[in-house]
Amino acid sequence: MAKILNLETATTNCSVSVSEGDATITLKENNAINYSHAEQLHIFIKEALEKASLSFSELDAVAVSKGPGSYTGLRIGVSAAKGLCFSLDLPLISVPTLESMARQVNAQEGELIIPVLDARRMEVYSGVYNKDYTEVREVKADIIDENAFAEYVASNKVHVIGSGAEKCQELLKHPNFIFDTSVVPSAKEMAVISHQKYQDRLFEDVAYFEPYYLKDFILQGKKNN
């Protein structure tokens, strides 16, 4: 089974895992108040591999969380992943950040999962997933008001999770909403996605791959200041 190094740096959680097949076998992470990726990421990579009793030469691929998320955090993770892929001649796999977050919820039939990452003011980055973690609506930036996600909550329980859930909870009062502000992106949940992409040979171009910043939305927000 493929052995994959998974890197998650989209938020303040600096997270590294090693997976074999679709199972996470080691995990090293620290969700600090401030970003610590520049100092910790390569240390965590070394420690995760040592705990798995693996060397770099035994890896089959490197996977990285592709965003959306922090510009600086994503750049650090992608730069590290690219460097490893270049030096070790390994394929690069990108994992959607919000999908891996959704996989922290065990939803029931008919329920939906909406991971939300805090952006600025009343903005969040969000996606909508069903209980099988299939994308129901594409990832985009939303401005939260009392009508946000109304089309999903009318007839379904909806799990709103992540750093943006607190601002959502202030305005979204429908009883079908279930909020969890404690969920952060973690390399632990990347294993299933990176393994499937490895099997399907869905690799990124190491030279040209860039994180998914939702940059156009951020620039538009600056114009309104």
Image: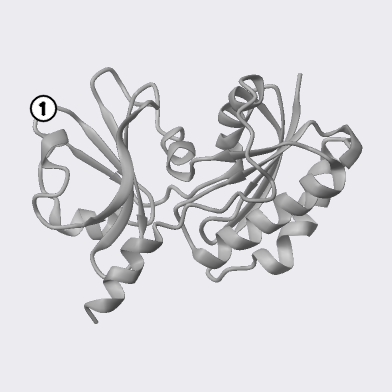
Q: Amino acid at mark 1?
A: Ser
Label 1 neighbour load within 10 Å: few <14, some 14-19, many 20+: few
Q: Which residue is pictured at 51% across the width and 65% down the height?
A: 71
Q: Which residue is pictured at 72% across the width and 63% down the height?
A: 40
Q: Quadrant of residue 159?
A: top left
Left or right relative to 85: residue 132: left
Q: Return the x and y of residue 4 as percentages of the image width and height.
A: 73, 33
Q: Return the x and y of residue 47 as percentages of the image width and height.
A: 82, 49
Q: Which residue is pictured at 9% across the width and 54% down the height?
A: 146
Query: Can residue 55 be seen here?
Result: no
Q: Which residue is pictured at 89% across the width and 35% down the height?
A: 53
Q: Is residue 91 above or below residue 134?
A: below
Find numbered disc 1 in the image and state the secondary structure of the residue it sits on: loop
Q: Return the x and y of residue 108 as percentages of the image width and height.
A: 30, 21
> Looking at the image, which residue sits at the far bottom?
225
Left or right relative to 183: residue 110: left
Query: What residue would you read off at disc 1?
Result: 155
Quadrant in which the N terminus appears: top right
Q: Is residue 115 above or below residue 73?
A: above
Count of marks, rendered view: 1
Q: Quadrant of residue 38?
A: bottom right
Q: Return the x and y of residue 72 as percentages of the image width and height.
A: 56, 67
Q: Is residue 41 above or below residue 5?
A: below
Left or right relative to 127: residue 196: right
